[in-house]
Amino acid sequence: MLMAPYSWHLEVPVWDTPCFCVGQEAREYSRMQVITHLGTLESYKAAYKDIIRAHCPTQPPDPEGDVFRAGWYSYIEDYGRAERQAFFSHPKKNTPNPECHICQGTGFRKSIKNPQAKWDTYKISQVLPVADILSRGDLFLHLIRPQGIVSAQGWRDLGTISPLTKAPVLQKGWHDLLVRVLRPHASETAAIVACEI
């Protein structure tokens, strides 16, 4: 099974992984900067819902559907970008908490969890011929906003999830990489999988 090597439940020999406290001060600073200059995430959500109601008064899109989510992800991009810029410009973005009770200020904790883990649980949302995915074009790919693609060649990251907005942050060139991996498999099927970790 292609997904198996990337399970969070696989246990491995003890290894050192960055502690949760690393960059904690920078994360708190970046959140406060965004709230100060752009408002709370809740205020952004309320404004987005107002826009949706104004443009679709009789039949608003399903809040759990792809169209609603894609619009929300685009709307929230500047919010997430501002948070990331504030974080990465902070001098303590890589600094551990010297009073952390987990790592005692070293910045590393012991773990037996799979360092390649990409999922804790997952749900198959669609199974489609690869040719259909490719033929649907850019809009379809932007609607699903994949964070990774797994094939016989292994897992390739296409992006991450913003810890603040919970929206996908796709890396530069993700679309070309995805199409390049899919194209040789045009006669096969692919599953679109929602992963949680």
Image: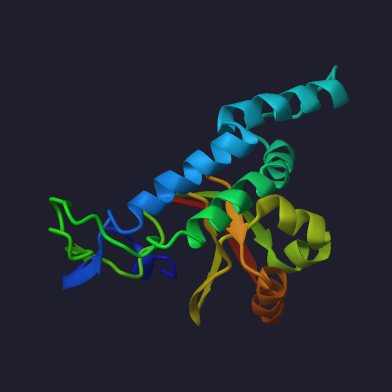
The answer to which of 154 and 33 lies nearer the viewer is 33
The answer to which of 32 and 148 lies nearer the viewer is 32
The reply, left or right, for residue 159 in relation to residue 139 is: left
The reply, left or right, for residue 55 in relation to residue 31 is: right
Q: Tell me if residue 5 comes above or below residue 57 in the rendering.
A: below
* Image x and y of residue 160, in percent: 52, 59
Residue 193 visible in the displayed image: no
Q: Tell me if residue 15 comes above or below residue 196 in the rendering.
A: below
Residue occupying the far front of the picture: 91
Count of all numbered marks drawn on residues in the image: 0
Colouring of the image = rainbow
* Image x and y of residue 46, in percent: 66, 24
Quarter of the image for residue 112 reads bottom left
The answer to which of 136 and 119 lies nearer the viewer is 119
Q: Tell me if residue 62 comes above or below residue 164 in the rendering.
A: above
Residue depicted at x 51% and y 61%: 89
Residue depicted at x 42% and y 50%: 27
The reply, left or right, for residue 183 in relation to residue 109 is: right
| Quarter of the N terminus within the rendering | bottom left
The reply, left or right, for residue 137 in relation to residue 35 is: right
* Image x and y of residue 14, in percent: 14, 71
Residue occupying the far top of the picture: 58
Residue 3 visible in the displayed image: yes
Quarter of the image for residue 40 reads top right
* Image x and y of residue 109, in percent: 18, 63
Q: Tell me if residue 131 comes above or below residue 41 in the rendering.
A: below
Residue depicted at x 74% and y 62%: 133
The answer to which of 181 and 109 lies nearer the viewer is 109
